[in-house]
Structure formats: structure tokens, C-alpha cells
Image (tube, rainbow, N blue to C red):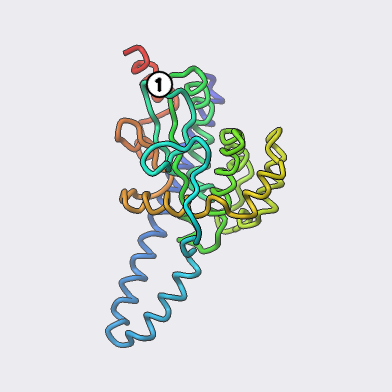
Amino acid sequence: MSEKNHDAQRTARQRLAAEREKQKSAERRRRTLIVGVTVICVLALATVIGLLAANSGKSGKTSAGPVVAPSGAQGKDSLAVPVGKDGARSTLTVWEDFRCPACQAFEAAYRSTIHELTGSGKLRVEYHLVRLIDGNLGGSGSLRAANAAACAQDAGKFPAYHDVLYDNQPKETDDAYASNAKLIQLAGKVPGLDTPAFQKCVNDGTHDAWVDKSHAAFQAGHFSGTPTVLLGGKNIAQDRTMTPAKLKQMVEAAAKG
């Protein structure tokens, strides 16, 4: 690996670590606020219940309608979008949010390696889409982008559109992906994706309830944040010793049996 590529990957890992720490700090602040509200509840129960109800709406309420899994979704409750060969010896389980900067940092560091390994049939990736940032900051960009990605899966274009969403990710506080028009515009970067069927799927929110169900599974798993990237049950996104080269070495060793 060239020194330039090494520096770029090291920078991406540093960004990933920084974003995860920021996410943890935000979660600590949120918990502190909840504790404060609980104390106030002793004095003004009715008022606090009203405030909590209002805040719940702003965080992104669950979607109405049937749970419609995208084409080819697999795993428990069909919540995983698979990429790669079914018979691969190694499986990477990724929980991600398209508004999450730490997810983008992971992408920057590992994308080329993951593409290489899935392309060679040595690695299978199972993507689980969640809406964590919608809950933390408000808005609906995480949900809308995840639904659009599921629509891309229906069209057989998930991997390419997945990459486009991260390449064009807005700032975490900018809920630009709440716009279906923006998501459809980005589909134009993937040959053959911007079709009437895709546009209808995005605008109708066909997979909204499926995204909510995926997010509920994420919460039930008690994961610490996004990205959560599991290999053999271990979250490699939190492993400071992990590198793309090390991941490749581990997967290739498993492929040899």
C-alpha cells in the first residue's frame, strides 16, 4: 500500500473514531435530559407527559402501513439486504444510517476492500438500515434515504445507490435527505435506476414500515451506535487495531478454510 493510501485510510479511521465519540457524547446529553425530565415529572406529571408526546413526534414516529421488505431481503424478518455470494465463508453485518457521518467515515476507509472481497466471493455483507439520526436530531432524512435504498434494492441497484448516498451525504444537521426529490435526483447517478417504478416507490414510502422494523431490531440489539459492523460477533468499527488490510487478511484466511 502506498504511503498516500495509508495516510488516507488512517485519516478516515480517525474521523470514524471522532464521530463515534461525538455520537456517544450526544447520547450522554440525551440521557441527562431524560433524567432531568423524570425529576420534573414528580412536580408536574401532566405537563411532562405532554412534552414527551410532542418530542416523540419530532423524533420520527413509526410509519403506518404494511411492512414491505425489498426484493431479495433475507435473514430474520427479512431485514437484511445482502451483497455478495451466499456461500462466502465470512459475513459482515452492517447496521448503518445514511445521515451518520461515522458511517460515511467507515465507508471511506473500507469501501474498496469490501467491494474487492464481495466481488471475489470471499465476503458476504448484510446491510441493516436504521434511522438513528432522525431520533437524535429530528427530521426524516434517515428514514427517507433508507426507504430509497430499499427501492434501489427492488431495482437490483442497491450497492451502487448505497455508495452514491454516502458520496453525497449532507452535513449531519442538514436534513437534506428528507426530500424525496433529492433522493430521486441522486438516483440519476446510477445507470438505469431513475425509473417511474423507483420514483413511485420513493414517493409512496413503500418500505417505510420495513425501515422502522429494522430500526426496532437495532434498538432491541442494544448496539451502542452506528455504524455497528459485526464480523464473527465482534464490532470491528470499534476496534482501533482493525484496518482494511487486516480485514482482508482475516477474510482471505477464512476463505482458505
The kind of residue tagged 1 is: Ala
Question: Is residue 104 placed above or below 38 in the rendered structure?
Answer: above
Q: Nearer the viewer, residue 29 or 59?
A: 59
Q: Quadrant of residue 191?
A: top right
Q: Nearer the viewer, residue 51 or 76?
A: 76
| Percent coordinates x, y for residue 185 in the rendering | 71, 46
Q: Residue at x 47, y 50 (%)?
A: 210
User: Quick one: which residue is furthest to the front in this view?
Assistant: 66
Q: Nearer the viewer, residue 200 or 148?
A: 200
Q: Residue at x 46, y 75 (%)?
A: 54
Q: Residue at x 58, y 54 (%)?
A: 205
Secondary structure at badge 1 equals loop
Question: Is residue 43 placed above or below 87 in the rendered structure?
Answer: below
Mark 1: give few (<14), some (14-19) or many (20+) Cα within 10 Å. some
| Percent coordinates x, y for residue 168 in the rendering | 64, 44
Q: Nearer the viewer, residue 166 or 257?
A: 257
Q: Which residue is mark 1?
A: 88
Q: Quadrant of residue 196?
A: top right
| Percent coordinates x, y for residue 46 in the rendering | 35, 86
Q: Residue at x 30, y 87 (%)?
A: 43
Q: Count every numbered label the image shows and give the total.
A: 1
User: Quick one: which residue is furthest to the top in this view?
Assistant: 256
Q: Is residue 213 left or right of 5 when viewed as pictured?
A: left
Question: Is residue 238 placed above or below 48 in the rendered structure?
Answer: above
For the C terminus, the quadrant is top left
